[in-house]
Image: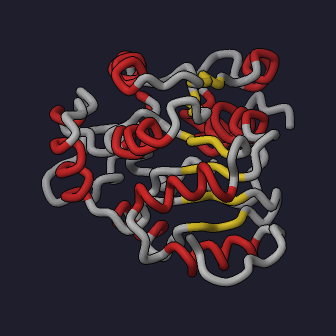
Amino acid sequence: MPDGTAPRRDGARFAAWLDAQYRSMAAPDMLAEMLTLHFPGRIALVSSFGAESAVLLHMVAEIDRATPVIFLETGMLFPETLAYQRTLAAQLGLSDLRLVRPDATDLRFLDGQGDLHRGNPDGCCHLRKTLPLRRALQGAEASITGRKRAQGPSRADMPLVEADARSGKLRINPLAAWDRGQITAYMAAHDIPPHPLVAQGYPSIGCAPCTSRVGDGEEARAGRWRGQDKTECGIHFDGTRWIRGPGAGI
């Protein structure tokens, strides 16, 4: 339980208060209080069912298997990811798994050939991830992510709790301070199967066209959008980028 009186639930101030209150609490305990004390019935876990997703999914299932789990099915995921999602959801008994897909009309008009990712990867992520997630979270006050500070420079200063400046919704990052060793140990302790692509050299897994194997000595996310000035899909950042380029109608 946190100490003191919480400020008004006004986004940034409330996020900063929660971050200060919970920064020394173990991740499962912090997550339990977010689900049952602060945001009961008004929070969802956003999961890619990627290389390290199973830890947070397991923690949530241990607390409340009926917690909404949002899975962005972009239409471009690896077959192994789709199979892993089915296997893990069944093993953990997740009872409110929501497969969220891009709007069919948006796809037809903005990416009719399915090749937007080649010339405009930001636009593709916006179309297939950011917009669908925004719609999926309309009824929630907060979302849970599996992001970690150790995943790269763009996440190095990430707090446990943060507020989206545009929407005011809070993002909870229970594993912010975890490293890969802790992830591996947790999965082994709870007999959680790994994503099948991890053993093939994919420590970070997104859409198939924009994910490549990672070599020895490279950062875990080095295989995401390789060779491009892009390190994030944008779903956890404030604002958006308009889709631009050939065939873009926005």
Assign the N terminus to one quadrant of the image: bottom right
Image x and y of residue 214, in percent = 23, 46
Viewer-closest of 116 and 59: 59
* Residue 226, placed above or below residue 176: above
Residue 238 vs residue 185, the one in the foreground: 185
Relative to residue 81, is residue 202 depicted above or below? below
Who's the residue at 54% across and 33% down the image? Answer: 118
Q: Is residue 36 above or below residue 106?
A: below
Q: Nearer the viewer, residue 245 or 104?
A: 104
Quarter of the image for residue 129 reads top right
What residue is rendered at 73% in x and 34% in y?
136
Task: Give percent across and percent down for residue 164.
Answer: 73, 62
Q: Is residue 120 visible in this depiction of the protein?
A: no
Left or right: where does residue 31 sit relative to residue 245? left
- Quadrant where the image shows the C terminus: top right
Q: Is residue 179 visible?
A: yes
Q: Residue at x 37, y 68 (%)?
A: 177
Left or right: 86 in relation to 68: left
